[in-house]
Image: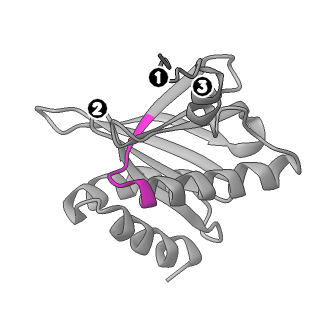
Amino acid sequence: MDVFYRTFLPAAAEAGVPLPAVSRHLPIVRRCVDADDTTVLVNRCAGDVLLVLTRRRLVVTRESRFLRRLRLLLNADLRHLSNVTWTPDLRHGAVELAADAVDGVRERFTLRIPGPERQGHVADLLERVFRSRTGAPATAGTHAEQRAMDRMPRFSPATV
């Protein structure tokens, strides 16, 4: 069993991805990822999409609703992604991940992540992976909600 398999299955279980979905997507993901690559994150996204992030690649597959056909949406080396941002959305239980691919198209994925603790964990994983690529902060959108709240005017009760 290679490094990818040893790290992929625990990451999928941690994210709560059902085993039948994992086994359907695995053949496509396996063709895109090297055997010695470590899986960092596996997560379901909005629209029957599975996102797999390794130390070197981002692979995204989509499953059609009725015929359950699989399609590869994105297979990119992390070095070829630019302007990578992620924004936790505590109200909707999601993290939005966005990046510019090599062809210049802005790709956006909404990772469904219940619970603020898990959202923080996923944001930390994303920061670790993308920050290690550049050596500098990779995103301006990590704490976008907090910055937006800081810019909002503060109202205090009127004193009479």
Report the amino acid beneath label 3: Ala
120 in the magenta segment: no
Badge 3 or badge 1: first in the primary sequence? 3
Q: Residue visible at 27% across and 54% down?
A: 24
What amino acid is labelled 2 in the image?
A: Gly
Q: Secondary structure at mark 3?
A: helix
Regarding mark 2 in the picture, which secondary structure is present there?
A: loop
Q: Nearer the viewer, residue 23 or 12?
A: 12
Tell me what residue is drawn at x 23 percent, y 65 percent.
Answer: 19
Give the magenta range.
Answer: 110-117
Q: Nearer the viewer, residue 103 or 116?
A: 116
The extreme front residue here reads 160
Q: Which mark is residue 78?
A: none
Q: On the rendered structure, is 123 left or right of 114?
A: right
Residue positioned most to the bottom: 1
| 3D distance between C-alphas at marks 3 and 1 | 22 Å
Which residue is tagged 3? 148
**Residue 43 at x, y = what percent?**
40, 52
Label 2: which residue?
47
Q: Marks 1 and 2: which is nearer the front?
A: 1
Q: Which residue is mark 1?
A: 157
